[in-house]
Image: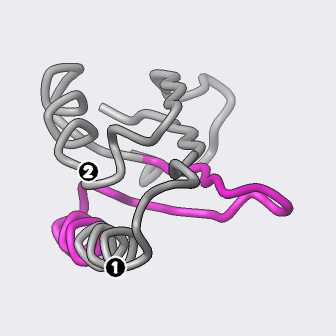
């Protein structure tokens, strides 16, 4: 199942820089593993924001929740999820 996920990050101003650096490194490794597995299909930065728009390809809502809640930045994120369905006018068969 495909999902559009918009994630906006809001790190606390009082978070120690060493802790922020550690969390960001963990986030990068975790997200790149998900990209390699095909579960995190696309990721785009949203210009002018500390945010991204991503496409996930996972089994169901539960798996998406598991993936998102495993993000090291999860406690510092506002997340918006939109399930996606194939459009009947789409001409490409590989849109999944």
Of residue 27 and residue 84, the one placed in the foreground of this image is 27
Q: Assign a secondary structure to mark 2.
A: loop
The region drawn magenta spans: 29-55
Q: Position of residue 24 (x, y in %)?
A: 36, 72
Q: Which mark is residue 18?
A: 1
In the image: residue 79, left or right of residue 53: left
The quadrant holding residue 29 is bottom left
- Rendered residue at 21%/67% (across/down): 30
**What residue is shown at x 37% (from left), y 46% (from top)?**
56
Is residue 81 positioned above or below 66 on the image?
Answer: above
- Work out whether mark 2 precedes mark 1 in sequence or the reverse, and give the earlier one: 1
Q: Callout 1: 10 Å neighbours few (<14), some, many (20+)?
A: few
Q: Which residue is disc 2 drawn over?
A: 71
SS label for mark 1: helix
Q: Position of residue 68 (x, y in %)?
A: 28, 40
Residue 50's disc is none
Is-magenta flag for residue 51?
yes
């Amino acid at each position: 199942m495909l999902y559009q996920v918009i994630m906006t990050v809001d790190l606390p101003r009082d978070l120690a820089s060493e802790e922020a650096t550690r969390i960001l490194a963990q986030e990068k490794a975790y997200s790149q593993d998900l990209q390699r597995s095909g579960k995190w299909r696309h990721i785009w930065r949203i210009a002018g924001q500390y945010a991204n728009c991503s496409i996930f390809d996972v089994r169901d809502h539960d798996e998406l929740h598991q993936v998102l809640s495993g993000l090291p930045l999860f406690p510092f994120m506002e997340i918006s999820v939109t399930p996606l369905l194939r459009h009947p006018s789409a001409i490409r068969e590989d849109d999944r």
